[in-house]
């Protein structure tokens, strides 16, 4: 019974996070030309790497935080370290994207997608906060806290509505 009661909030949290990190591509596909949507999707795919680069930190942090929580120890230091190292990893990725965007594009998509270069250079910067949110979500789940779902839900709604109303910019 305890597992099933905790399953719904966790499923909701990861569903909301998936919406937060993917709804932009759907909105772009709806409002822009196929060619522009293709460039955006290429940049978005490269930018999504910024969500997965710190995933190793999450995988290492989660069991340790859970263990510390069960022993009633303070795990805030672990959270701060994970956020700090995630920022360093993201910063390195951003620098790599700024210095070598054409190399990345040509390796992954070919030269016909060079028009996506300006998007790629800033996509990592825009997705870094989402990597931080992913760490926070997993931290709170490891501590058996679910109150974070409401801010994530609010952020998802705000992002979705903002993309609809301000898609032209």
Image (spheres, grey):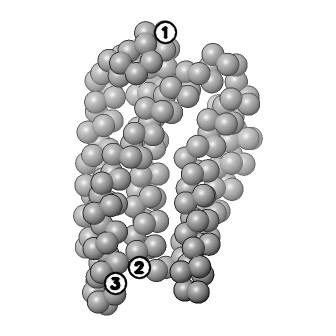
The reply to whether the C-beta atoms of the residues labelled 3 and 2 are less than 8 Å apart is: yes
* Tag 2 secondary structure: loop
Mark 2 nearby-residue class (10 Å; few <14, some 14–19, many ≥20):
some
Q: Earlier in the sequence, mark 2 or mark 1?
A: 1
The reply to whether the C-beta atoms of the residues labelled 3 and 1 are less than 8 Å apart is: no
Q: Earlier in the sequence, mark 3 or mark 1?
A: 3
How far is mark 3 from mark 1, CA to CA?
51 Å
Identify whether 27 is placed above or below 134: above
148 displayed left or right of 141: right
Q: Which residue is mark 3?
A: 69
User: Residue 43 at what x, y percent from top left?
Assistant: 48, 28
Residue at position x 32%, y 18% from top? 103
User: Residue 46 at what x, y percent from top left?
Assistant: 43, 32
Q: In the rendered image, which quarter is residue 147 located in? A: bottom right
Identify whether 101 is placed above or below 152: above
Q: Residue furthest front?
A: 1
Q: Which residue is mark 1?
A: 112
């Amino acid at each position: 019974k305890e597992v099933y009661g905790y399953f719904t909030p966790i499923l909701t949290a990861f569903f909301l996070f998936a919406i937060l990190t993917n709804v932009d591509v759907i909105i772009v596909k709806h409002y822009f030309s196929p060619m522009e949507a293709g460039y955006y999707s290429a940049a978005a795919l490269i930018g999504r790497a910024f969500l997965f680069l710190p995933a190793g930190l999450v995988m290492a942090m989660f069991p340790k935080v859970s263990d510390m929580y069960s022993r009633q120890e303070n795990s805030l230091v672990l959270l701060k370290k994970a956020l700090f190292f995630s920022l360093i990893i993201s910063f390195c990725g951003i620098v790599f994207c700024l210095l070598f965007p054409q190399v990345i594009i040509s390796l992954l998509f070919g030269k016909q997608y060079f028009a996506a270069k300006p998007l790629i250079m800033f996509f990592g910067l825009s997705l870094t906060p989402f990597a931080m949110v992913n760490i926070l979500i997993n931290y709170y789940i490891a501590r058996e806290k679910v109150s974070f779902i409401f801010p994530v839900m609010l952020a998802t709604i705000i992002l979705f509505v903002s993309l609809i109303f301000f898609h032209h910019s």
